[in-house]
Image (cartoon, rainbow, N blue to C red):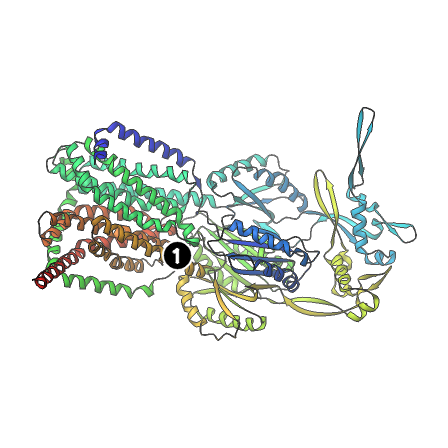
């Protein structure tokens, strides 16, 4: 222990090392990134393919299936999902958690290249991307303007988006809404028939007739001239002068066959904000960026841009998660400061010395600030988990210093000088301090190596606590004894200190006296005592089924999201009308500040019959919660005829997207799947508090079917491909070239004039090229009406239907357990199966990893205690307190109506280290006194008396430090509360068990030892 003497006897050296750590810690803190949650890398790869004009059935057959078959051969694939929609295919490949997602992305991309020749020629190249769950927009900006939409879009793209993407730390800015400029060549079918010109020939003429080309160079004397052919149209009207050659050495102007319009792309969706047409910009940050600082720089940039924008432009930041992040992290530090203050107050009540309270006020912040150094070096961010780790560790930080402070203070009270007391007190308690530190490290190290989303999510939390625990050990063994050696105070408290603590000392002294007599009674009747605690434990087990289960607590961020889905044959105009009515209703609600609208859907939920409304609530603290408002709005939304609606009022800090309960039924026949799905829907609707029940299967989209007649085509020498190309060229259009103006490029699209495509009946008259003539389309096809799917889902290469639902005023786990029991009773045909997704899958997979980490923590803690005490028996006695700590955890969860969640389970893992510490201190001192010749009964009785104060101080300060977190006040409060609640319940139970349950077990163990020893002795004699 000479090292301790060095730190005590060299106060300047000790203070300098501490100041260096503090300075480096403050520097590290200033440079840490800030985010809501830690970076989570989910091994998911997506493949998206656009095939314009194709329906879901064709997309499934021609695009999705070939891609599924190819990627199924990649090693490590866990599940394949595909979404076949109108004009687009999404294939989602989920890998096992131990697969490197970057390598998997490359493997998937290589497999896609091998089958690219099998995909339709008109389909765009598949895009393979690694799914990044962290790449969610942290800020949304709405831009409104009185300019035509195409010009407003150009301004937003050129001046706003481009300028924002130059900001360091911003990964990209995505544009939603608005319409791109596009040059449309509207073909007149009558003129095409008259001049015998096919749409394909028009497109080729535009491609060849409007282009610039570098043609080389010519050297003339000392000069060199570049030669360029300049054939591109400089104005849109010049496109009319492109000539198309006809038979007989004549040509016809493009303007005589069509009318050319400078317009926009087809409107398949739109965005609104505040009742006005808008263009929305979603800002996505780079991993590890400081979103709070990034938000500030974006706001500054927008202020600078406002003066350079055309008149009539208005920029509004509709949503900024950085404000929530900033406030949530600020609240954690607020709770830390309150916890430190309350801890100091508790210590003052025990020590009755203001000087000792000041020591704690120096020691605790030093350990916290020093923790920022390794956080910065390991590229961690200040997020909900890392800051929560700091806040929770306050109790751990003070425990080590309390043990040292209390022991040094005891030696001072015995008459030792400050230097001698610091040295002897620290040396005597060093083993206990190292023991408690070792058990805390043993608990959290397994969490660092956890797999799954939970492992990545909790890593920052565990690493932060490991760092802070190590720094608390360093501070407790260096700074604390050094400061205590420099502090001199009278043996008796001052009159002021006595007055300030008189209300506490009397009751506490009576508590000590009651404790001594109570401990004596537990030692005299050990079987009764142990039976009492076992009965309490069994009673608490009966409460477990009454506890709810959820993956991550839901947080009210003042934002609600409503999705509307109209009948599959609804037009964009009708969707706009219904969505507008809902928007107007919402805007006049008293708690609503603004409404952001996006019509047209996105991703796997694309469609003109879909819309999304984001409702932004006011900051009024007296407004109803978003959960309450959502429940009120459900009645209104459900009353709208022929509209399927869903409303979400929470922000989850991690986990799978979509509704929390998702049941997937997969098999071959879509009709059979539909029957099974409706059975599941009925079960969900009959389950209380399960709302927004729906499936993703839609049948009923009106189709006009064009069926080629094979014998007619064969007789004329035509093919089905010729029919397909002709119809697509007329209705969807063909990209015929590029029009360039002022450095920007705009697509030129040849398409049938809307005046000739405004009725289904006109399709039969489409002119079909036949040799050098034209025939009506109806002469080689049969035309009929029908219905088809709007989207097709496939799971693991089988067709599938997903049934999903939200849960209101009930935990997800509780609701799902009721549903699962009834779903299991459904008789499935051979080849059909159920699987689960969403939050219920997160709970199943990640809780299993947590239970494994918990088991590993228990094993490591047991082995560490055995090594420290040199006894497997005493280690086992101490570990008995762990399951019995449920007498504190389960009731407090039940009373506070706190569901078992990721945070709550993490608190239980943390308890493994906290609960056993008290028992270690008592057993360690009791064994020390027994080895000095005192019988076990008196040794353990003395240990309980001597170690009562440090145990009560440590537990009480830890509980007090966590109390602000447990209250869950302010932004992010629901994240912090479950862990603190579990810890408080466990600490109360752990302290009680250490003081009253461990001593009887210790006595019985020695009785058994003596009995066994006497029996062996008598047997040998």
Image: 585 above or below 686: above
Pick whichever, 399 or 704, lies toward us.
Answer: 399
Image coords of residue 601 (percent x, y): 59, 56
- The part of the image, by quadrant, that contains residue 63 is bottom right
Image: 260 above or below 228: below
- The part of the image, by quadrant, that contains residue 232 is top right
Q: Is residue 487 left or right of residue 904?
A: left
Image coords of residue 945 (percent x, y): 13, 49
**Local secondary structure at mark 1:** helix
Image: 971 above or below 80: above
Image: 503 above or below 1015: above
Pick whichever, 438 or 670, lies toward us.
Answer: 438
- The part of the image, by quadrant, that contains residue 431 is top left
- The residue at 13%/57% (across/down) is 1006
Image coords of residue 541 (percent x, y): 28, 64
Considering the image in quadrants, where does the C terminus appear? bottom left
Spot the residue most to the front.
1021
Spot the residue most to the top.
222
Circle 1 crowding by C-alpha within 10 Å: few under 14, some 14–19, many from 20: many
Q: Is residue 700 left or right of residue 294?
A: right
Pick whichever, 642 or 492, lies toward us.
Answer: 492
Pick whichever, 327 or 730, lies toward us.
Answer: 730
Q: Is residue 185 visible?
A: yes
Considering the image in quadrants, where does the N terminus appear? top left
- The residue at 31%/55% (across/down) is 908
- The residue at 63%/38% (across/down) is 311
Q: How many numbered discs sit on the rendered protein?
A: 1
Image coords of residue 75 (percent x, y): 53, 57
Q: Is residue 904 visible?
A: no
Q: Which residue is mark 1?
A: 849
Q: Is residue 869 left or right of residue 265?
A: left
């Amino acid at each position: 222990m000479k090292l301790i003497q060095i730190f005590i006897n060299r106060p300047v050296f000790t203070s300098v090392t501490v100041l260096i750590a503090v300075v480096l810690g403050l520097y590290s803190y200033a440079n840490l990134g800030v985010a809501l949650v830690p970076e989570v890398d989910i091994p998911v790869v997506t493949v998206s393919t656009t095939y314009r004009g194709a329906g879901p059935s064709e997309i499934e057959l021609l695009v999705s299936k070939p891609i599924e078959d190819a990627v199924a051969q990649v090693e490590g694939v866990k599940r394949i999902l595909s979404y076949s929609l109108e004009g687009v295919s999404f294939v989602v490949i989920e890998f096992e958690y131990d697969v490197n997602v970057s390598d998997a992305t490359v493997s998937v991309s290589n497999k896609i290249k091998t089958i690219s020749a099998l995909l339709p020629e008109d389909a765009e190249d598949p895009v393979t991307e690694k799914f990044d769950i962290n790449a969610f927009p942290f800020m949304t900006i709405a831009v409104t303007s009185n300019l035509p939409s195409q010009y407003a879009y150009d301004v937003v793209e050129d001046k706003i988006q481009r300028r924002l993407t130059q900001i360091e730390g911003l990964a990209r800015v995505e544009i939603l809404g608005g319409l791109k400029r596009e040059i449309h060549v509207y073909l007149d079918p009558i003129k095409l028939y008259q001049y015998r010109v096919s749409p394909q020939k028009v497109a080729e003429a535009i491609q060849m007739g409007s282009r610039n080309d570098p043609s080389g160079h010519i050297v003339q004397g000392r000069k060199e001239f570049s030669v360029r052919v300049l054939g591109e149209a400089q104005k849109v009207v010049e496109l009319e002068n492109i000539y198309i050659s006809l038979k007989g050495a004549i040509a016809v102007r493009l303007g005589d066959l069509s009318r050319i319009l400078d317009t926009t792309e087809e409107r398949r969706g739109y965005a609104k904000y505040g009742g006005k047409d808008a263009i929305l910009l979603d800002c996505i940050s780079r991993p590890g960026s400081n979103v709070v600082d990034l938000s500030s720089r974006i706001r500054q940039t927008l202020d600078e841009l406002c003066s350079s924008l055309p008149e009539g432009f208005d920029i509004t930041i509709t949503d900024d998660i950085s404000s929530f992040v900033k406030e949530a992290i600020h609240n954690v530090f607020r709770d830390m400061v309150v916890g430190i203050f309350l801890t100091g107050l508790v210590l003052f009540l025990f020590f009755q010395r203001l000087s000792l309270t000041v020591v704690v006020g120096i020691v605790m912040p030093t350990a916290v600030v020093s923790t920022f150094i390794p956080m910065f070096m390991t590229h961690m961010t200040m997020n909900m988990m890392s800051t929560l780790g700091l806040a929770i560790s306050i109790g751990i930080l003070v425990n080590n210093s309390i043990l040292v402070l209390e022991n040094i203070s005891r030696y001072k009270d015995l008459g030792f000088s400050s230097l001698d007391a610091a040295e002897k007190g620290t040396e005597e308690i060093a083993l206990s301090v190292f023991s408690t530190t070792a058990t805390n490290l043993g608990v959290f190290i397994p969490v660092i190596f956890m797999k799954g989303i939970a492992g990545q999510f909790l890593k920052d939390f565990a690493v932060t606590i490991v760092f802070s625990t190590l720094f608390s050990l360093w501070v407790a063994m260096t700074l604390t004894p050094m400061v205590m050696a420099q502090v001199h105070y009278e043996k008796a408290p001052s009159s002021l200190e006595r007055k300030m603590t008189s209300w506490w000392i009397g009751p506490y002294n009576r508590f000590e006296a009651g404790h001594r007599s109570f401990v004596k009674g537990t030692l005299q009747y050990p079987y009764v005592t142990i039976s009492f605690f076992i009965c309490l434990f069994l009673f608490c087990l009966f409460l477990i089924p009454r506890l709810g289960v959820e993956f991550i607590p839901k947080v009210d961020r003042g934002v609600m999201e409503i999705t509307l889905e109209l009948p599959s044959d609804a037009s964009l105009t009708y969707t706009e009308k219904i969505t507008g009515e809902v928007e107007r209703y919402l805007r006049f609600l008293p708690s609503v500040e603004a409404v952001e609208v996006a019509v047209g859907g996105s991703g796997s939920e694309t469609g003109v019959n879909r819309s999304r409304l984001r409702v932004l609530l006011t900051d009024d603290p007296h407004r109803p919660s978003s959960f309450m408002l959502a429940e009120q709005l459900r009645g209104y939304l459900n009353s709208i005829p022929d509209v399927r609606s869903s409303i979400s009022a929470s922000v989850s800090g991690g986990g799978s997207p979509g509704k929390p309960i998702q049941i997937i039924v997969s098999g071959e026949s879509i009709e059979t799947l539909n029957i099974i799905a409706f059975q599941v829907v009925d079960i969900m609707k009959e389950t209380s508090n399960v709302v927004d029940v729906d499936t993703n299967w839609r049948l009923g989209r009106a189709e006009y079917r064009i069926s080629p007649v094979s014998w007619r085509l064969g007789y004329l020498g035509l093919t089905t491909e010729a029919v397909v190309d002709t119809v697509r060229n007329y209705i969807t259009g063909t990209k015929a070239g590029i029009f360039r103006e002022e450095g920007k490029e705009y697509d030129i699209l040849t398409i049938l004039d809307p005046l000739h495509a405004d009725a289904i009946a006109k399709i039969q008259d489409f002119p079909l090229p036949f040799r050098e003539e034209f025939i009506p389309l109806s002469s080689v096809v049969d035309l009929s009406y029908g219905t088809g799917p709007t989207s097709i889902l496939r799971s693991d290469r089988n067709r599938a239907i997903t049934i999903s639902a939200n849960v209101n005023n009930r935990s997800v786990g509780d609701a799902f357990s009721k549903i699962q029991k009834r779903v299991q009773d459904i008789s499935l045909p051979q080849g059909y199966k159920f699987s689960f997704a969403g939050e219920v899958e997160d709970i199943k997979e990640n809780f299993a990893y947590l239970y494994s980490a918990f088991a590993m923590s228990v094993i490591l803690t047991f082995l560490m205690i055995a090594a420290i005490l040199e006894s497997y028996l005493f280690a086992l006695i101490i570990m008995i307190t762990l399951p019995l700590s449920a007498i504190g955890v389960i009731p407090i969860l039940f009373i506070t109506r706190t569901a078992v969640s990721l945070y709550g389970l993490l608190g239980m893992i943390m308890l493994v280290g906290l609960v056993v510490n008290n028992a270690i201190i008592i057993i360690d001192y009791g064994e020390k006194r027994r080895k000095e010749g005192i019988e076990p009964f008196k040794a353990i009785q003395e240990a309980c008396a001597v170690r009562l104060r440090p145990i009560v101080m440590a537990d009480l300060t830890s509980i007090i430090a966590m109390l602000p977190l447990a209250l869950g006040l302010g932004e992010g409060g629901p994240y912090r509360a479950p862990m603190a609640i579990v810890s408080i319940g466990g600490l109360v139970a752990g302290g009680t068990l250490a003081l009253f349950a461990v001593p009887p077990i210790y006595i019985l163990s020695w009785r058994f030892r003596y009995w066994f020893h006497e029996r062996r002795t008598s047997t040998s004699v």
